[in-house]
């Protein structure tokens, strides 16, 4: 019986301890978690998990561990807030991937982001072509924030009294100088048509970092630098 009481008390203490730490750090959703927060949660789970069923670990020791970790979390959170440079070191910086419509290939390579990954994140925001992007930033929590070019901002069709036109759907056809036969399953492309469009714009395929073909037949090219 004493074992169950001990486990129950430890669970209650752990629950409120984790709640206090979450309250201190101010994280409300998973999307707000930084890599450091994720590692902190792993360490906390290990502290709680290892102490629950270990008879040698007393309730006092559990309280001490949670209190110490809570204090560390509190002071670290305050330090990252008040000391900007330290905050950048601890939580990272937002990365500008697209600057005024130009893809920052150096940043893509530095952070190991493929064009296909970038397009995948854009599609999650209902943007299906790089041509529509004016700015795109990779946030510290791994999400992508995007500002569209003004001409691609969807107007309020009801207010304008016009029929809304759907965005153009695009698929990747060239990636890092390689012509892709089928970059998206279920969507085939005409290889010869792509080669012809590349020649029309004065490029060779091995000079292209990325290219996408829109459903209207337009080929958008990002040359290698």
Image (spheres, grey):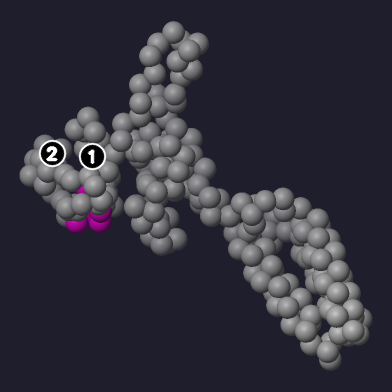
**Range shown magenta:** 173-178
Residue at the location (16% across, 44% down)?
Answer: 189
Callouts 2 and 1 close, C-beta under 8 Å = yes
Residue at the location (77% across, 59% down)?
Answer: 22
Residue at the location (40% across, 37% down)?
Answer: 127
Residue at the location (24% across, 33% down)?
Answer: 215
Query: Residue 97 location, x and y as percent?
Result: 44, 48
Q: Nearer the viewer, residue 62 or 93?
A: 62
On screen, 3 above or below 173?
below
Residue 149 visible somewhere in the drawing = yes
Tell me the quarter of the image containing the N terminus.
bottom right
Q: Secondary structure at mark 2?
A: helix
Residue 202 visible somewhere in the drawing = no
Label of residue 26 in the image: none
On screen, 143 above or below 19?
above
How many residues crowd mark 1 within 10 Å: few (<14), some (14–19), many (20+)?
Answer: many
Q: Which residue is mark 2?
A: 197
Residue 59 in which image quadrant: bottom right
Q: Nearer the viewer, residue 144 or 53?
A: 53
Q: Nearer the viewer, residue 47 or 83?
A: 47
């Amino acid at each position: 019986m004493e074992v169950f009481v001990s486990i129950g008390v430890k669970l209650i203490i752990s629950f409120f301890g984790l709640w206090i730490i979450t309250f201190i750090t101010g994280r409300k959703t998973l999307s707000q978690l930084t890599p450091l927060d994720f590692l902190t949660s792993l360490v906390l789970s290990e502290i709680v998990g290892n102490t629950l069923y270990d008879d040698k670990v007393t309730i006092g020791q559990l309280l001490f561990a949670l209190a110490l970790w809570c204090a560390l979390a509190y002071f670290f959170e305050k330090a990252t807030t008040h000391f900007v440079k330290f905050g950048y070191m601890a939580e990272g910086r937002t990365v500008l991937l697209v600057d005024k419509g130009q893809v920052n290939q150096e940043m893509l390579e530095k952070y190991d982001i493929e064009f296909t990954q970038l397009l995948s994140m854009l599609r999650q925001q209902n943007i299906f072509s790089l041509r529509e992007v004016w700015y795109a930033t990779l946030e510290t929590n791994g999400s992508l924030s995007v500002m569209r070019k003004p001409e691609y901002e969807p107007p309020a069709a009801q207010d304008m009294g016009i029929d809304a036109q759907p965005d153009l759907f695009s698929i990747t056809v060239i990636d890092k100088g390689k012509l892709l036969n089928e970059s998206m399953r279920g969507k085939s492309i005409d290889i010869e048509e792509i080669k012809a469009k590349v020649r029309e714009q004065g490029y060779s395929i091995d000079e292209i970092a990325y290219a996408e073909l829109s459903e209207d037949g337009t080929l958008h090219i990002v040359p290698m630098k």
